[in-house]
Image (cartoon, helix red, strand yellow):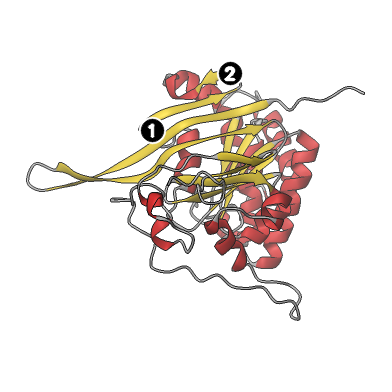
Amino acid sequence: MNTVVAQSLLQIRNLKKYFSIRGGVFSREKARVHAVDDVSFEIMKGETLGLVGESGCGKSTTGRAILRLIEPTSGEVWFQGENVTKLDKRSMRHLRKEIQMIFQDPYSSLDPRMTVSSIIGEALLVHGLAPGRKAREARVVELLETVGLSSEHMGRYPHEFSGGQRQRIGIARALAVNPKLIVCDEAVSALDVSVQAQVVNLLEDLQEKFGLTYLFIAHDLSVVEHISTRVAVMYLGKIVELAPAKELYINPRHPYSEALLSAVPVPDPTAKRERIILEGDVPSPVNPPSGCRFHTRCALRVPSCSQNEQVLTEVSPGHWVACQVRTGAVAN
């Protein structure tokens, strides 16, 4: 029997993104928001990596830094063996054929002055993928049908569609350039629950049909469980746990992951789940806690948690946790 070795499509190495807070007469830097602080992970070809955490933890900033929609402060982003952070504008334009993004808000991510045909066809025109108007229109029709819409929608404007239909248009736009990786930035969070399920099923069908790889950013853990191969849990700019999806949901090891999962509604009304209530508020990313970022809210903390930087440690095959208490690395 031949063993299939998964190929790494994207590698993130020590990625950081700090935002300056300026003020005063000379607009000097007063402080920095540590939005993404030394994040490392990789995504295998054909898989879906879910990136979850509370609002403001740095998930969307990570996704945008990968595409260099915002410039990273430091660190490296490697895509198919090429360092994305070192590319010039011309090379980045070519790379964006390979990496696309589906944005969170289907209402603001589509230009209200453009027809559906123009929105989807613009990428084809920019990258020269469908020479000639007829070829471009034929490709747009094909893409619309792929996402569950029809040729009748080509001449309409975004305001004539529902939220779910708009997001399908956004998906068609992302597919237009035949990407290998799609960053889904809260792609279903603005939609009704029933529509969320339809869009998630569509994304799974497209992944199987076109061999796509997803970075699926979300705060709804029930959605992430359904679509993800592996899940990375993020807290205050850092990844605190990374594991296969089923493993994480059955056996979360980081205290923050446990608290997040305890808040997920259980479909069976007779089933009981112990709710973990975290103490205090999320610290400010302007002045994050020393040592473990989570220690100010953690029931398991020991004195050394506030002193030692937590490092992701493999506790079982493919299951990584940044918690010295759970990995048995507590300093005396």
Dot 1, how many residues are within 10 Å of its Cα: few (below 14), some (14-19), or many (20+)? some
Q: Name the outermost residue toward the front.
A: 332
- Quadrant showing the N terminus: top right
Q: Position of residue 249 (x, y in %)?
A: 68, 56
Instruction: Tell me the amino acid under the disc marked 1.
Output: Glu
At 73% across and 55% down in the image, what residue appears?
Answer: 226
Q: Hey, which quadrant is residue 195 in on the image?
A: bottom right
Residue 16 in percent (x, y) is at 40, 36
Which residue is disc 2 drawn over? 81
Q: In the image, 158: left or right of 89? A: right
Which label's residue is closer to the chain start, 1 or 2?
A: 1
| Residue 279 located left or right of residue 104 | left
Q: Is residue 199 visible?
A: no
Taking the spot 76% from the left edge, 53% from the top edge, the residue there is 201
Q: Residue furthest bottom?
A: 270
The three-letter code of the residue at mark 2 reads Gly
Q: Is residue 249 above or below residue 90?
A: below
Residue 301 appearing in the image:
yes
> Which of 242/69 is in front?
242
Q: Residue at x 58, y 18 (%)?
A: 81
Q: Position of residue 2 (x, y in %)?
A: 88, 22
Q: CA distance from mark 1 to mark 2?
A: 19 Å
In the drawing, does residue 254 fall left or right of residue 133? left
Q: Position of residue 160 (x, y in %)?
A: 60, 60
SS at badge 1: loop
Q: Which residue is mark 1?
A: 71
